[in-house]
């Protein structure tokens, strides 16, 4: 990736404008002023700043973002009616074809991973090596022994589909309706349908973690940050294990 193309992508400006920006001496690469727009950036190691302000993250071939999805936002790249998870970050990545790796319901909140790396998304979502997902769930009725046993054995949904074993346990000793669920597969409305088998309703659903990576507690709803290199590698490792 050349510096002028990177600046154009990150700042939403033309190549010509990036070349002028570099020539003006306002751009630094790894701390040193860089006026040569054709400078090649090596993957994952380069920090570019304009007027001393670093552009979010170092240059990367692909983008990996952790977003805290608010309620009412849909997990899609675009939608004619609703705000999408990609709309929440588009301004910062105007030229990237970002999409959510996995879905969260419109009413659910929490960790959504956005990327433009199709192979990576495929790897962590592929059936058979699906990376686990951890959810904090608020039920409309207390957790029962039958639910715990059923989840561990593999719930059979109303349509006859039998799911892989999942984990459910109390999340708060003072609130029997607050539970933590860990899934190892991704089926549409999975948690709501699993509890539905036990006539339990879901009042709140928040994704806390994807595999070994937890949602950053500093991210308010609607906010995002780039995954660190260690987090990307940890997700890849989890998929390959
Ligand atoms: N299960 C659900 O029912 N909804 C989600 O958003 C995620 C898992």
Image (cartoon, helix red, strand yellow):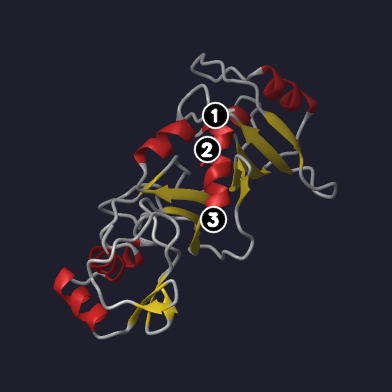
Residue 40 visible from this viewpoint: yes
| Mark 1 to mark 2 CA distance (whole Å) | 6 Å
Q: How crowded is the residue under tag 1: few (<14 C-alpha within 10 Å), some, or many (20+)?
A: few
> Which residue bears the numbered disc 2?
236
Closer-to-camera residue (61/212):
61
For image coordinates 61% across by 58% down, the residue present is 216
For image coordinates 49% across by 64% down, the residue present is 223
Mark number, residue 8:
none
Residues tagged 1 and 2 counted as in contact (Cβ below 8 A)? yes
* Relative side of 59 to 198, left or right: left
Q: Quadrant of residue 133?
A: top right
Residue 112, image x and y in percent? 49, 49
Quarter the N terminus occupies: bottom left
* Relative side of 45 to 96, left or right: right
Residue 83, image x and y in percent? 35, 58
Q: How crowded is the residue under tag 3: few (<14 C-alpha within 10 Å), some, or many (20+)?
A: few
Mark 3 residue element: loop
Residues tagged 2 and 3 counted as in contact (Cβ below 8 A)? no
Residues tagged 1 and 3 counted as in contact (Cβ below 8 A)? no
| Mark 1 to mark 3 CA distance (whole Å) | 19 Å
Mark 2 residue element: helix
| Mark 2 to mark 3 CA distance (whole Å) | 13 Å
> Which residue bears the numbered disc 3?
228
């Amino acid at each position: 990736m050349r510096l002028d193309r990177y600046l154009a992508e990150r700042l939403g400006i033309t190549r010509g404008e990036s070349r002028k920006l570099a020539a003006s001496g306002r751009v630094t690469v790894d701390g040193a002023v860089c006026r040569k727009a054709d400078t090649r950036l090596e993957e994952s190691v380069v920090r570019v700043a304009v007027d001393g302000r670093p552009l979010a993250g170092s240059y990367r071939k692909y983008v990996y973002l952790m977003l805290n999805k608010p309620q009412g936002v849909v997990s899609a790249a675009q939608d004619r009616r609703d705000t999408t998870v990609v709309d929440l970050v588009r301004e910062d990545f105007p030229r990237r074809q970002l999409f959510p790796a996995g879905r969260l319901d419109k009413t659910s909140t929490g960790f959504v991973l956005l990327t433009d790396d199709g192979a990576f998304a495929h790897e962590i979502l592929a059936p058979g090596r699906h990376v686990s997902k951890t959810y904090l769930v608020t039920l409309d009725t207390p957790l029962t022994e039958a639910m715990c046993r059923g989840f561990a054995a593999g719930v059979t949904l109303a349509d006859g589909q039998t799911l892989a074993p999942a984990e459910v346990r109390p999340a708060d000793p003072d609130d029997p309706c607050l539970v933590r669920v860990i899934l190892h597969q991704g089926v549409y409305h999975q948690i709501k349908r699993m509890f539905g088998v036990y006539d339990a309703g879901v009042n709140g659903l928040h994704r806390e973690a994807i595999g070994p990576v937890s949602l950053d507690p500093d991210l308010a709803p609607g906010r995002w940050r780039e995954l660190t290199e260690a987090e990307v590698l940890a997700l890849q490792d989890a998929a390959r294990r």
